[in-house]
Image (tube, helix red, strand yellow):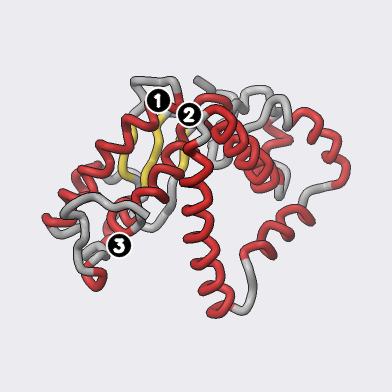
Amino acid sequence: MTSLANDNPQDSARIPNDPSSLTDKSTQEDILNVFPSEFQNVIQRRQKILSSLAYFIGKDFQIPVELGLPGKGWYWDFENNVIKADPMDLLNKSMDYLRFVISHEGAHRRISRASFIPESEWNTPGFQAMMNSVEDCRVNNFTIESYPKFHEQMESAYLEIAELRQKAKEKAGKTASMVSWNCFKNYKKSHIESLQTIYTNPIVFQISNPHDSH
């Protein structure tokens, strides 16, 4: 796995000072300021490098790559057309992992759509999680076929994810797959036919209003 020169802060300090004050309305400056100054430099440097990859994969050279709340993960904000990056990952994860995640989110921008989905369908319990599971696979397949180098980064990233899941399994006594299975069980059988639509018009998770697309 690769890393940036001078991007190796001590592991014991790779955490925010006090993220509890942050909210969804916090500014980019607010988010950065919960990290020590030397870590801010690492986060911003990596954010800048990865932004160019998002532009390229997403074929959108205006899409912002902004910091999300620490520890809340990555996602493409469909309504506002912005990619949210987890600053904790920018600080702690390998560059192979980060390239995989930003390429994945950029691919969502390029091929994922949700405006065709009725709001009543979208709000069905379990629907969003199920759709996201299907769409994530499609996005990865698209990116691998279009950019073969992505396959190596995806393999490295999933190895890291597998290690984290194993640790979570040992700690909690259950795997993330159980959560996914529960989502499928909650999804009503009467909606299964909509899977035929998913493969041609898939969507992305974490969209508050699927009818406001870009």
- Residue at (21% x, 44% y) in the render: 44
Q: Which residue is mark 3?
A: 20
**Pointer 3 or 2: first along the chain:** 3
Image coordinates for residue 29, horizontal then vertical, percent: 19, 44
SS at mark 3 in the image: helix
The Cα atoms of the two marked residues, 1 and 2, are separated by 20 Å
**Pointer 1 or 3: first along the chain:** 3
Amino acid type for the residue under numbered disc 1: Phe
Tell which of 54 and 130 is nearer to you: 54
Label annotation for residue 79 = 2
Tell which of 87 and 42 is nearer to you: 42
SS at mark 2 in the image: loop
SS at mark 1 in the image: helix
Q: Quadrant of residue 112?
A: top right
Residue found at the very far left of the displayed protein: 37
Image coordinates for residue 184, horizontal then vertical, percent: 76, 53
Mark 2, other Cα within 10 Å: few <14 / some 14–19 / many ≥20:
some
Judge depth for marks 1 and 2 and give the one in front.
1
**Pointer 1 or 2: first along the chain:** 1
Whether residue 180 is situated above or below residue 144 in the rendered picture: below
Amino acid type for the residue under numbered disc 3: Ser
Q: Quadrant of residue 50?
A: top left
Image check: 151 left or right of 82? right
Image check: 29 left or right of 180? left
Image coordinates for residue 146, horizontal then vertical, percent: 54, 27
Amino acid type for the residue under numbered disc 2: Glu
Q: Which residue is mark 1?
A: 56
Q: Quadrant of residue 210?
A: top right
